[in-house]
């Protein structure tokens, strides 16, 4: 269900939890074309500082997009911008908690700015800020 711009308030939050699977990583590599061996090759990954395969950072960032599209503000919301800072690796089997919080609203443009955090075991693995164009109630009703 869409939350229209007129119903948004700073401080509103949404959260989701998802466990990263090997299938997620393989499917993301196939769809994106990113076949970096750090994501797909256990022998290669063992030679890196991570010592094992890690998820694509952009796969984890896509959890933010999913939360924006499904919950806050929901269907009809359009990404205008996103900053990302990758803090820690995410490994197969990690449970990622994604949280977005509205930090500011621009009524003249019907845009919301959201603080975005993905965390594993309480530690941020990805942080950023999203700018979202939000449908107005009067636009939806004519």
Image (spheres, grey):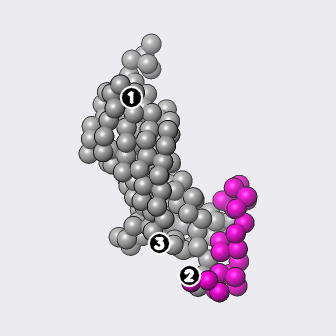
Tell me, for residue 3, which label it has, or none.
Answer: none
Secondary-structure class at tag 3: loop
Q: CA distance from mark 3 to mark 2?
A: 10 Å
Residue 33 x, y percent position in the rendering: 73, 58
| Circles 3 and 2 in contact, beta carbons < 8 Å | no
Q: How many marks?
A: 3
Give neighbour class at mark 2: few <14, some 14-19, many 20+ (Cα, 10 Å): some
Query: Is 139 placed above or below 106 here?
Result: above
Residue 120 x, y percent position in the rendering: 42, 70
Task: Answer with mark 1 or mark 2, whichever residue precedes in sequence.
Answer: 2
Tell me, for residue 110, which label it has, or none.
Answer: 1
User: At 62% from the left edge and 63% from the top edge, which residue is drawn?
Assistant: 24
On-image quarter of the C terminus: top left
Give neighbour class at mark 3: few <14, some 14-19, many 20+ (Cα, 10 Å): some
Q: Which residues are magenta?
A: 27-49
Q: What kind of secondary structure does the magenta stretch mostly adopt?
A: helix
Q: Is residue 64 magenta?
A: no
Report the residue marked by disc 2. 50
Secondary-structure class at tag 1: loop
User: At 41% from the left edge and 50% from the top edge, which residue is drawn?
Assistant: 129
Task: Answer with mark 1 or mark 3, whichever residue precedes in sequence.
Answer: 3
User: At 46% from the left edge and 61% from the top edge, which residue is drawn?
Assistant: 85
Along the line of sight, which residue is nearer the eye, 20 or 111?
Answer: 111
The residue sitting at the top extreme is: 142
Report the residue marked by disc 3. 88
- On the image, which quarter does residue 109 sit in? top left
Relative to 111, 104 lies left or right: left
Q: Is residue 134 visible?
A: yes
Query: Is 4 placed above or below 141 here?
Result: below
């Amino acid at each position: 269900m869409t939350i229209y711009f007129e119903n948004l308030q700073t401080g509103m939050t949404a959260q989701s939890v998802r466990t990263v699977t090997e299938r997620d990583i393989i499917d993301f590599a196939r769809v994106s074309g990113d076949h970096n061996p750090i994501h797909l090759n256990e022998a290669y990954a063992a030679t890196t500082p991570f010592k094992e395969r890690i998820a694509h950072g952009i796969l984890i960032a896509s959890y933010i997009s999913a939360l924006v599209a499904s919950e806050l503000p929901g269907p009809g919301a359009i990404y205008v911008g996103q900053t990302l800072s990758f803090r820690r690796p995410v490994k197969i089997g990690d449970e990622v908690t994604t949280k977005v919080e509205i930090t500011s609203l621009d009524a003249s443009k019907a845009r919301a700015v959201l603080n975005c955090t993905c965390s594993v075991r309480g530690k941020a693995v990805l942080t950023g800020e999203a700018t979202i164009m939000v449908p107005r109630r009067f636009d939806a009703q004519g």
